Amino acid sequence: ILRPSIPEILQSYEFLAEVDFIRAKSYFAIQTNSLKPAIENEQLLDWTMAVHPLLQLSLAKHGKKVVPLDIELNQKQRILIISGPNAGGKSVCLKTVGLLQYMLQCGMLIPLHERSHTGIFSNIFIDIGDEQSIEDDLSTYSSHLTNMKIMMKSCNERSLILIDEFGGGTEPQIGGAIAEAVLKRFNQKRTFGVITTHYQNLKHFAEDHEGVVNGAMLYDRHLMQALFQLQIGNPGSSFAIEIARKIGLPEDVIADASEIVGSEYINADKYLQDIVRDKRYWEGKRQTIRQREKQMEETIARYQSEMEELQKSRKEIIKQAKEEAERMLQESNARIENTIRTIKEAQAEKEKTRLARQELTDFRTSLDTLTSKEQEEKIARKMEKLKEKQERKKNKKNEPKTATATPSNSPKVIPVTVGDNVKLKGQTSIGQVMEINGKNATVAFGSIKTTVKLDRLERSNVTTKTESFAKTTFVSSQTHDQMYEKKLNFKQDIDVRGMRGDEALQAVTYFIDDAILIGMDRVRILHGTGTGILRTLIRQYLSTVSGVSHYADEHIQFGGAGITVVDLD
């Protein structure tokens, strides 16, 4: 039964194995917080916060965290020589680089920061641990040399070499010399590598040759403990004397050892430690300065934004203030025009009318000639007053209201005077006080004058005298308000240039009607010169309007025959 399905079963078996393999990789990636970094088509190591996954899992069981590794290898610094104290993390750095690079090239996700960049190497050569073999008659040093021979023969610019305790296992002086010669060949072949060592000559080689760079595993001299942090740029100290003293080796033994090696070496090692310490200090300072600069830039940007907003608000307030001033000017203009009309109705002399108009013109001119600075100062003072007024209102609102009004809060009764707008108690008709004789007052309700006792009168809520002129017993409040609004918004000029004859006549008709209705003395019609047809039609119409007393060309300086000035009764 199964034999015919053997190919399908084998295929399913392979498929399940592949799916299980993919699931295992993803599960391991989740466990180790791994990800896929940016992969470049070149030889490169630019890793940030790389972590050895097995060490991470092991320390996590004991509630500890791995110190992440930051490392960079590129075309300018291909080989990194790591030095530092024993048990300081040199080998862990080496194994982290080897394991993560191999995992990546096996298609696995690796635990490092997402901003890291990785490359691909054709060969990875590793010499870690003691490959001593009794059967093959190989000592520790012999096994190291065998590996060096294979590496020198096979490595190229696409290779990665990882060597732990480079040159170790034999006499330090000759071991260091052979290691330096081998390192020179690696550098000539432009290979990449990470190498750990204690030899001073290899540190000097890294300082003197391009392509090779020193790195140090940091150590806290005060706390006498390793920090497990890699710092590229300076060689590290072995801290042999300090570690021996911490372990408790007799002080006389340490003194003898120091004397044997010589004060010059001890001092050089001490100076190296001081340099590393100072570099850490200034690196911390630089980070602090960067943070402060960033905060300062953000603060400056915020202040600039707020200043721009304030400038914008200031311009808006000035604009509103100017509009308010213009509105007040128009209202003043309407009041003066109304006064002139009243004088004219009272058959006053034309000279007084002319003088009143001249005063209005002077007032406008004086307002326009104010410098912008003066305007801004006045507006600023106005804004301050408005702000104080708003504050007072706000404070009043916040005060608790009493259930009954006290006598001090009751409004004062203002006596009626000549010119006040008044009404009879219980009535809505509004009149104006013309004269007061003792306890009696003469009040004009429209065209009707009557004598009323003062105690029967009460002041009207109407605030402007112009309203009292227009409001009578025969005109509704709504009609009066419409008329007053029309008077405020009325323009004394109309432009009919470009219109057809019938359109122009209709516009002029409405315009003249409104002007007569609100009591204008003079208006202007802009019709242009052209062929003169519009001018003739408009003037023929004006000659038929009873409210028009006179019309003529404007003065030559202000438009001449292109404008008709119309005087109204």
Image (cartoon, rainbow, N blue to C red):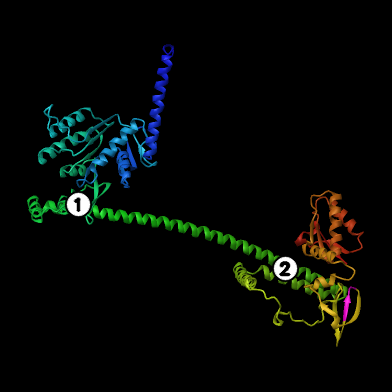
Residue 245 lies in quadrant: bottom left
Residue 94 picture location, percent across and down = 25, 39
For the residues labelled 1 and 2, say whether their Cβ atoms are less than 8 Å apart: no
Nearer to us in this view, 206 or 113: 113
Can residue 352 be seen here? The reply is: yes
Q: Which residues are magenta?
A: 442-446
Residue 556 picture location, percent across and down = 77, 61
Vertically, is 320 above or below 124?
below
Q: Quickly name the residue at label 2.
A: 329
Q: Quickly name the residue at label 1.
A: 272
Mark 1 or mark 2: which comes first in sequence?
1
Q: Estimate the spatial distance between the alpha carbons at disc 1 and disc 2, rounded to whole Å.
A: 83 Å
Q: Is residue 554 left or right of residue 444?
A: left
Q: Is residue 350 left or right of residue 412?
A: right
Residue 500 picture location, percent across and down = 83, 48
Nearer to us in this view, 444 or 172: 172
Magenta span includes 445: yes
Residue 92 lies in quadrant: top left
Residue 399 picture location, percent across and down = 63, 73
Q: Residue at x 67, y 67 (%)?
A: 368
The extreme bottom residue here reads 438
Report the predominant secondary structure element of the magenta stretch: strand
Check disc 2 and give the amino acid type. Leu
Vertically, is 483 above or below 86?
below
Q: Residue at x 39, y 25 (%)?
A: 18
Task: Say which quadrant the C terminus sits in.
Answer: bottom right
Nearer to us in this view, 392 or 56: 56
- Badge 2 element: helix
